[in-house]
Image (spheres, grey):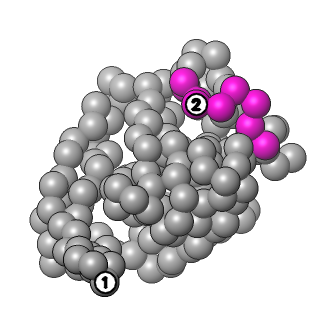
Amino acid sequence: MNVRETPLQGVVTIEPQVHGDARGFFLETYREDRYREWLGDDLRLVQHNHSRSEHGVLRGLHCQTRRPQGKLVRCLAGEIFDVVADINPESVTFGQWVGVVISAANHVMIWVPPGYVHGFQVLSSSADVEYKCSDYYDPGYESGLIWNDPEVAIDWPLAQPTLSAKDRELPGLDHYRR
């Protein structure tokens, strides 16, 4: 298993060992003792989510202001451009982002620690995305960052995404300055 750090503190990509042959493949998607080595001894994944989205859909960028969630993200079918951005004004990487292509073919996963915003854009005709969360979803404290904030300047692969009404109304980076 290859674990690669990104420029954002604690955000890592994970390339699991894939055992494949003519029948197909097998891989471990999560093993608590191994993941604790990289993600910390207090890691607990308590909620597992699965979404399906069509080509061009952009989900995010989401976070929770209370009970922030860490997320272990993988793509079960299709291909996505996955993005993590730093909204902590006390961080040296405030306003910076990382993006990685995650697909059913490359098996890459990404760990998004609590406190970051996260989202993805579907590059294939559709995509199934699964994410394991370190805390429970709390709809009363959901927030995020608008996908096209000019200061963050995420280089999305598709310029005209399909967004939910809620995601079109997310705040800009200025919302997080203290």
- Residue at the extreme bottom: 23
Question: From what the image shows, is residue 110 above or below residue 176?
Answer: below
Which SS type dominates the magenta stretch? Answer: loop
SS at circle 1: loop
Question: From what the image shows, is residue 121 above or below residue 178?
Answer: below
Identify the residue under disc 1. Answer: 23
Q: Residue at x 58, y 31 (%)?
A: 157
Q: Please state the horizontal and vertical placement of residue 108, each as a whole percent of the image.
A: 33, 56
Please state which amino acid type lies under the numbered disc 1: Arg
Q: Which mark's residue is nearer the viewer, 2 or 1?
A: 1
Identify the residue under disc 2. Answer: 157
Q: Residue at x 32, y 35 (%)?
A: 8
Is residue 70 visible from the viewing direction of this image? Answer: no
Q: Nearer the viewer, residue 92 or 148?
A: 148
Find residue 144 and name its label: none
- Residue at the extreme right: 165
Query: Is residue 158 inside the magenta stretch?
Result: yes
Query: Is residue 84 inside the magenta stretch?
Result: no
Q: How many labels does the image show?
A: 2
For the N terminus, the quadrant is: bottom left
Q: Give the range drawn in magenta.
A: 154-162
Q: Which of 127 and 178 is in front in this view?
A: 127
The Cα atoms of the two marked residues, 2 and 1, are separated by: 33 Å
